[in-house]
């Protein structure tokens, strides 16, 4: 057998291995994370389940996921009870009690506000993906743009016609950590990609990029023509001077 045939055979074997690895690795990692989550919840919930209601008592093997099912049912039941008048009164009493504890009230209040923001207003957390020049001019960083809200920061630092907007610049490859920055509206270049595509781009360190869009848009929805560039401070997109009333009638 010639060296060329041996090299060709080894190349095919390597390609087959890489293809199989690409197929199996995400499945294995996903299954491992899911199984670990189920086991973690079971380890917390199962010890509090009465023995006569625990299927592990009657079976020769443990039932994975039973604790998770019980936890989901209990959380749903607590939510149902907290939605009525009696439940709300109990929750308010508990919150007032926690509010009198110096250390606990700060932790509980912060966590409650975070969960309410994430779960109740999920669609308003981040509005769009954008680019800002950071850490120096000519270098662009991907950011998630939050909705415009009037805060004390805006009252102190806003410029006329160019308000500050909160943006979150995530770190690669962990998008749950990053920097909160307030950037002038004119200094943000918005992209057409979705929040999910932006997160994939960050997690993959730029290797998994979404399909190229035909155009970019500014914060007010006007298209940006030409090469990507940082808009000048305070610059506003040119608008047509002709209005509906000035157009000739046909």
Image (spheres, rainbow, N blue to C red):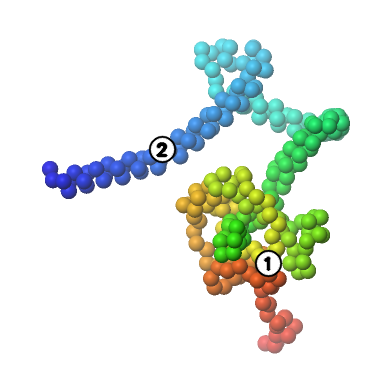
Q: Tell me which label, 2 or 1, sits earlier in the chain.
A: 2
The answer to which quarter of the image holds residue 67 is top right
In what quadrant of the picture does the N terminus appear? top left
Q: Residue at x 31, y 45 (%)?
A: 15
The answer to which quarter of the image holds residue 228 is bottom right
Query: Label 1: few (<14), some or many (≥20) within 10 Å?
Result: many
Residue 231 in the image: x percent, y percent? 63, 69
Where 54 falls versus 167 (above or below)? above
Q: Which residue is mark 2?
A: 24
Which residue occupies the extreme left position in the image? 1
Is 244 in front, or is 195? 195
Q: Residue 186 bears which disc, if any?
A: 1
Residue 38 in the image: x percent, y percent? 57, 28
Where 153 falls versus 66 (above or below)? below
Q: Could you tell me if the residues under marks 2 and 1 are in contact, i.e. CB atoms within 8 Å?
A: no
In what quadrant of the picture does the C terminus appear? bottom right
Q: Residue at x 45, y 39 (%)?
A: 26
Residue 82 in the image: x percent, y percent? 79, 32
Q: Residue at x 64, y 63 (%)?
A: 188
Which residue occupies the extreme front position in the image? 136
Residue 170 visible? The answer is: yes
Q: Secondary structure at mark 1?
A: helix
Kindly report which numbered mark, 2 or 1, lies closer to the viewer in this rendering.
1
Residue 170 in the image: x percent, y percent? 60, 49
Q: Is residue 182 left or right of residue 39?
A: right
Query: Label 2: few (<14), some or many (≥20) within 10 Å?
Result: few
Residue 91 visible? The answer is: no
Q: Is residue 89 left or right of residue 70?
A: right
Q: Residue 223 bears which disc, if any?
A: none
Q: Residue at x 52, y 63 (%)?
A: 213
């Amino acid at each position: 057998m010639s060296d060329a045939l041996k090299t060709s055979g080894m190349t095919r074997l390597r390609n087959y291995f890489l293809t199989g690895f690409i197929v199996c690795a995400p499945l294995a990692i996903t299954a491992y994370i899911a199984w670990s989550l189920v086991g973690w919840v079971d380890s917390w919930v199962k010890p509090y389940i009465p023995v006569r209601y625990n299927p592990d008592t009657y079976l020769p093997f443990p039932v994975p996921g039973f604790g998770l099912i019980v936890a989901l049912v209990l959380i749903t039941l607590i939510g149902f009870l907290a939605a009525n008048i009696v439940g709300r009164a109990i929750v308010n009493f508990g919150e007032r009690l926690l509010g009198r504890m110096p250390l606990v009230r700060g932790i509980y209040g912060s966590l409650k506000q975070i969960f309410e923001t994430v779960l109740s207003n999920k669609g308003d957390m981040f509005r769009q993906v954008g680019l800002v020049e950071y850490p120096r001019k000519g270098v662009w960083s991907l950011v998630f743009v939050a909705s415009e809200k009037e805060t004390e920061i805006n009252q102190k630092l806003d410029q006329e016609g160019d308000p500050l907007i909160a943006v979150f610049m995530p770190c690669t490859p962990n998008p749950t950590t990053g920097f909160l920055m307030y950037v002038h509206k004119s200094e943000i270049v918005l992209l057409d990609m979705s929040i999910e595509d932006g997160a994939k781009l960050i997690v993959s360190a730029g290797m998994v990029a979404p399909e190229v869009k035909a155009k970019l848009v500014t914060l007010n929805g006007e298209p940006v023509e030409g090469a990507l560039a940082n808009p000048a401070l305070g610059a506003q997109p040119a608008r047509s001077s002709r209005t509906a009333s000035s157009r000739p009638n046909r």
